[in-house]
Image (spheres, rainbow, N blue to C red):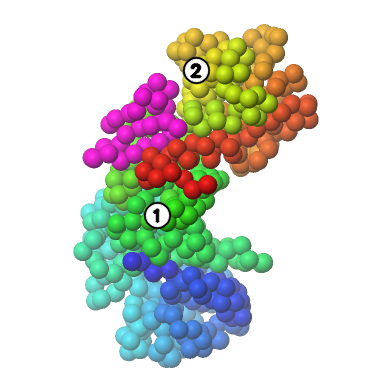
């Protein structure tokens, strides 16, 4: 299984020691980033190996590789001398040297060999262009980096699902290299840090995050050790661990990993559920096949496309025309939908009603016509409501309305004649108002006064601009948290075959 390496990023030596103490129970090793230390503090690090019992990596990173060396006027000769000074202690487990990059290479490599320190040959690609090369070329580069017993490290920025797939294929093509590190940077690359074992990486990197005055992560997309271990159970992930994920764009706001990983833990089940940002669901499924994922929760904006590209689909998903759940079945993926049931579950109580049957005959306004809207529309029609469907792209509103025999119009004040006499329920299904665009209002022209309930599927932020306007008008409100948990419970049962713990 992969180890967890903490990047020591504090500007002072005392800060470095504090980071080690704070995360010691979660980590297996650490990387001393000397370029991030204040110049006056750097030689103090010679004592670090004797202050800790874990393996340490000695690193002095250049600006082109994401470091700060030279920002204070330091030269390459200074860098070589600092490497040599610290290597004299002979207590460093590893030294990180950029692949075919600097004059420090020969002198530091010789000193490392003399000290019994393993050499990491690293390649950093911060613009993502490296992943445009053929997989075979990248694999050959990594093999060259491994020559002489070095540990090759490739850290490449993933700017989308296609780049993440390339990275996964490179990891697959270099399986024969026993010790290597292959990581994706940025949010698209974060799964490679959680699933380091599936990428064949001997370790993953993490940074101290969230503490008072804490510096930023050492590289884009890094998580903190506590999150990796307590939320994702990093140290338990191996080749047989069941894997699940929530897939969307954006995805950083999602609470699903907290919910599902909590249930897996409380139920005593093995498994990890992670967030995966995807701009192309079809490409992402190819990557999931390589990783061996068993189930996916699908969110905005992929629900309709997910249904279209799956090999099989269950009745709710086919009828609704969108999938929020994908299950690995044999060599393909089966699409399902738990959104409709999850959407309906909290609705009667939120409206002050005793049952779903009491919804019959009421009128509802729907903002949006995407995958989430489709689930709400079908659930409400089954409950006996009449609907008005409004969408920014008018053709999508028309299509959904004609499929279901409902009224439709544009998502603008031109639709006000359709709302004469008021509505009993308003349902907001779009991403407008979602983090990080919390100040947006999907329908600033609409007055919620007189409506019984405004239901916004967004749960982050807890109260959107639309819900705040409704509350100010004396209207009951409901955000997407209850729906999220209700549909997630159904997904959990599909994923694991077990009921979610209370």
For the magenta stretch, what is the residue range? 311-338
Q: Is residue 230 visible?
A: yes
Q: Earlier in the sequence, mark 2 or mark 1?
A: 1
At 38% from the left edge and 81% from the top edge, which residue is drawn?
Answer: 93
At 54% from the left edge and 76% from the top edge, which residue is drawn?
Answer: 20
Q: Is residue 336 magenta?
A: yes
Res. 215 image quadrant: bottom right
Q: Could you tell me if the residues under marks 2 and 1 are in contact, i.e. CB atoms within 8 Å? A: no
Res. 347 image quadrant: top right
Which residue in the rendered view is the most extreme toward the front?
Answer: 354
Describe residue 212's horizontal placement relative to residue 373 as left or right. right
Residue 173: x percent and y percent? 23, 56
Residue on which disc 1 sits: 269
Describe residue 212's horizontal placement relative to residue 105 as left or right. right
Mark 1, secondary structure of its residue: loop
Residues 212 and 479: in front is: 479
Which residue in the rendered view is the most extreme toward the left?
Answer: 176
Residues 425 and 440: in front is: 425
Residue 230: x percent and y percent? 49, 61
Q: Quadrant of the N terminus?
A: bottom left
Which labelled disc corresponds to residue 154? none
Mark 2, secondary structure of its residue: helix
Residues 82 and 469: in front is: 469
Residue on which disc 2 sits: 382
| Vertical side of 187 occupied by 238: above or below | below
């Amino acid at each position: 299984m992969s180890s967890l390496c903490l990047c020591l990023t504090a500007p002072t030596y005392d800060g470095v020691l504090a980071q080690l103490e704070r995360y010691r129970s979660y980590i297996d090793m650490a990387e001393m980033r000397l370029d991030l230390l204040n110049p006056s503090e750097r030689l103090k690090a010679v004592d670090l190996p004797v202050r800790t019992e874990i393996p340490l990596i000695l690193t002095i990173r250049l600006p082109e590789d994401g470091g700060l060396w030279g920002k204070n006027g330091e030269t390459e000769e200074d860098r070589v001398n600092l490497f040599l000074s610290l290597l004299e202690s002979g207590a460093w487990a590893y030294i990180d040297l950029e692949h075919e990059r600097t004059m420090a290479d020969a002198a530091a490599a010789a000193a490392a060999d003399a000290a019994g320190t393993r050499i990491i040959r690293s390649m950093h690609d911060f613009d993502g262009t490296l992943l445009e090369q053929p997989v075979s070329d990248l694999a050959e580069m990594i093999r060259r980096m491994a020559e002489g017993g070095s540990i090759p490290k490739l850290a490449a920025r993933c700017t989308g699902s296609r780049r993440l797939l390339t990275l996964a294929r490179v990891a697959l093509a270099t399986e024969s290299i026993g010790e290597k590190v292959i990581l994706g940077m940025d949010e698209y690359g974060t799964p490679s840090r959680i699933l380091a074992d599936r990428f064949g990486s001997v370790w993953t990197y993490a940074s101290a995050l969230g503490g008072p005055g804490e510096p930023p992560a050492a590289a884009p997309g890094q998580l903190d050790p506590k999150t990796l271990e307590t939320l994702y159970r990093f140290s338990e992930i191996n080749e047989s661990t069941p894997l699940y994920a929530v897939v969307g764009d954006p995805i950083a706001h999602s609470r699903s990993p907290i919910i599902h990983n909590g249930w897996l833990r409380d139920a005593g089940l093995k498994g990890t559920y992670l967030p995966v940002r995807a701009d192309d669901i079809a490409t992402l499924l190819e990557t999931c096949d390589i990783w061996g994922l068993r189930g996916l929760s699908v969110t905005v904006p992929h629900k309709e496309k997910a249904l279209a590209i799956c090999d099989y689909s269950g009745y709710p998903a086919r009828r609704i025309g969108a999938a929020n759940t994908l299950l690995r079945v044999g060599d393909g993926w089966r699409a399902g939908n738990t959104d409709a049931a999850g959407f309906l579950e909290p609705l009667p109580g939120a409206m002050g009603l005793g049952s779903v049957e009491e919804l019959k005959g009421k009128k509802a306004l729907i903002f949006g016509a995407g995958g989430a809207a489709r689930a709400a529309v079908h659930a409400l029609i089954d409950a006996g409501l009449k609907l008005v469907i409004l969408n920014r792209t008018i053709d999508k509103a028309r299509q959904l309305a004609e499929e279901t025999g409902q009224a439709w119009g544009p998502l603008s004040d031109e639709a006000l004649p359709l709302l004469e006499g008021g509505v009993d329920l308003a349902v907001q299904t779009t991403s407008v108002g979602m983090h990080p665009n919390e100040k947006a209002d999907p329908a600033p022209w609409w007055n919620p006064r007189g409506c019984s309930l405004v239901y916004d599927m967004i749960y982050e932020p807890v109260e959107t601009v639309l819900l705040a306007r409704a509350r100010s008008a004396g209207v009951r409100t409901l955000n997407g948290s209850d729906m999220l948990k209700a549909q997630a419970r159904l997904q959990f049962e599909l994923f694991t075959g077990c009921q979610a713990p209370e």
